[in-house]
């Protein structure tokens, strides 16, 4: 780890990263289609990076419905390997921050390997910070989707489900989660403690199936969700389901769930799921009056002291 555990976060560059992908599973061969990075240094946004990427494979219909990113938009864009030299400087010498960052890292680790690059070596064993892990310890499991958590903390994301806007929202969420701990004066060791301990860039179980947050939490809690799903005619439908488990069938992942509409156990293709929303998600509290947003553009000073 290139930083001392007793260093305040205000003295540590933070690279907040988000990726959009062709589907739900890096282990099943899904690829990155967009990357967004926000580098935060000395109390301000130092640099930003966003890039569409040619995944060299098909983008699932559910992803296109959620993000608006189409096959045509990615065709002719650089591959991950080609854009890596432009992205890497924003990550190096920084702590890596993400929302459910295990999911993003599961894709990044594989993309680095395809580029014949070692992510641990290039990022020098960077500290990893996860807003989901901090939120779970503070608010409990469930209801920690990025947009919902942001609104709970008094921030209304201007956009969602694109890499750079989500990276900026994650940075806002992290900023607000830090406030009870002392803000950016919080030491790195205290931030790691708040998320339950340190994390590595590479997961301890290399073939661990890491799922999108909303699906993972629905399976863990056994709670019903509203599922937006594309039918066989690519029509967007809604139904209430209770996720039961995930099965692998050939080169596809399937969600086994109890469908309330049919009152029966049904099988749904993960690639056709647009999004899941908890039925019992609590309404966000009123926004704190003292909260202020992070700077909107590179080079602007933060409204909070560090």
Image: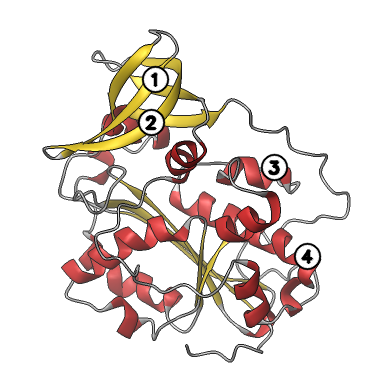
Residue 234 sits above or below residue 146 on the image? above
Which of the pair 255/26 is nearer the observer? 255
Q: Secondary structure at mark 1?
A: strand
- Residue receiving disc 4: 179
Verify CB contact (< 8 Å) between mark 1 and mark 2. Answer: yes
The mark lying in front, picked from 2 and 4, is 2
- Residue receiving disc 1: 258
Query: From this viewpoint, is residue 163 visible?
Result: yes
Which residue is found at the position 39% from the left and 20% from the top? 258
- The image shows residue 186 at horizontal and vertical percentages of 72, 78
Q: Residue furthest top?
A: 262
- The image shows residue 159 at horizontal and vertical percentages of 56, 41
Give how far apart the Cα atoms at labels 2 and 4 are. 37 Å
Verify CB contact (< 8 Å) between mark 2 and mark 3. Answer: no
Give how far apart the Cα atoms at labels 4 and 1 are. 41 Å
- How crowded pointer 1 is (Cα within 10 Å; few <14, some 14-19, many 20+) is rated as some
Q: Secondary structure at mark 4?
A: helix
Give how far apart the Cα atoms at labels 2 and 3 are. 28 Å
Q: Secondary structure at mark 2?
A: strand
Choose the circle earlier in sequence order: 3 or 4. Answer: 3
Which residue is found at the position 39% from the left and 58% from the top? 104
- Residue receiving disc 2: 244
Q: Residue furthest right?
A: 289
Give how far apart the Cα atoms at labels 3 and 4 are. 16 Å
The mark lying in front, picked from 4 and 1, is 1
| Label placed on residue 72 | none
- Residue receiving disc 3: 151
- The image shows residue 9 at horizontal and vertical percentages of 66, 79
Choose the circle earlier in sequence order: 2 or 3. Answer: 3
Which of the pair 67/104 is nearer the observer? 104
């Amino acid at each position: 780890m290139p930083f001392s555990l007793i260093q305040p976060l205000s003295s540590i560059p933070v690279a907040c990263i988000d990726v959009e992908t062709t589907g739900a599973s890096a282990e099943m061969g899904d690829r990155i289609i967009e990357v967004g990075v926000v580098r935060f240094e000395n109390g301000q946004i130092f640099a930003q990076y966003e890039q569409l990427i040619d995944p060299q494979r098909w983008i699932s219909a559910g992803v296109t419905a959620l993000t608006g990113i189409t096959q045509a938009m990615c065709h002719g864009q650089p591959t991950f390997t080609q854009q890596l030299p432009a992205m890497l400087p924003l990550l190096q010498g920084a702590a890596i921050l993400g929302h459910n960052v295990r999911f993003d890292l599961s894709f990044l680790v594989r993309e680095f390997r395809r580029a014949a690059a070692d992510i641990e070596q290039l990022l020098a064993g960077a500290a990893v910070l996860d807003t989901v892990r901090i939120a779970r310890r503070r608010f409990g499991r469930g209801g920690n989707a990025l947009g919902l958590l942001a609104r709970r903390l008094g921030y209304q994301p201007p956009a969602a489900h694109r890499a750079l806007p989500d990276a900026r929202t994650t940075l806002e969420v992290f900023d607000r989660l830090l406030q009870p701990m002392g803000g950016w004066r919080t030491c790195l060791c205290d931030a790691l403690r708040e998320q339950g301990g340190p994390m590595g860039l590479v997961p301890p179980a290399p073939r661990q199936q890491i799922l999108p947050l909303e699906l993972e939490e629905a399976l863990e809690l056994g709670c019903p969700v509203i599922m937006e799903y594309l039918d066989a005619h690519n029509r967007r439908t809604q139904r209430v389901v209770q996720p039961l488990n995930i099965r692998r069938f050939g080169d596809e992942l399937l969600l086994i769930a109890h469908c309330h509409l049919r009152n029966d156990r049904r099988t749904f293709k993960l690639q056709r799921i647009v999004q899941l929303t908890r039925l019992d998600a609590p309404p966000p509290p009123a926004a704190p009056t003292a909260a202020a947003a992070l700077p909107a553009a590179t080079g602007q000073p933060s409204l909070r002291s560090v």
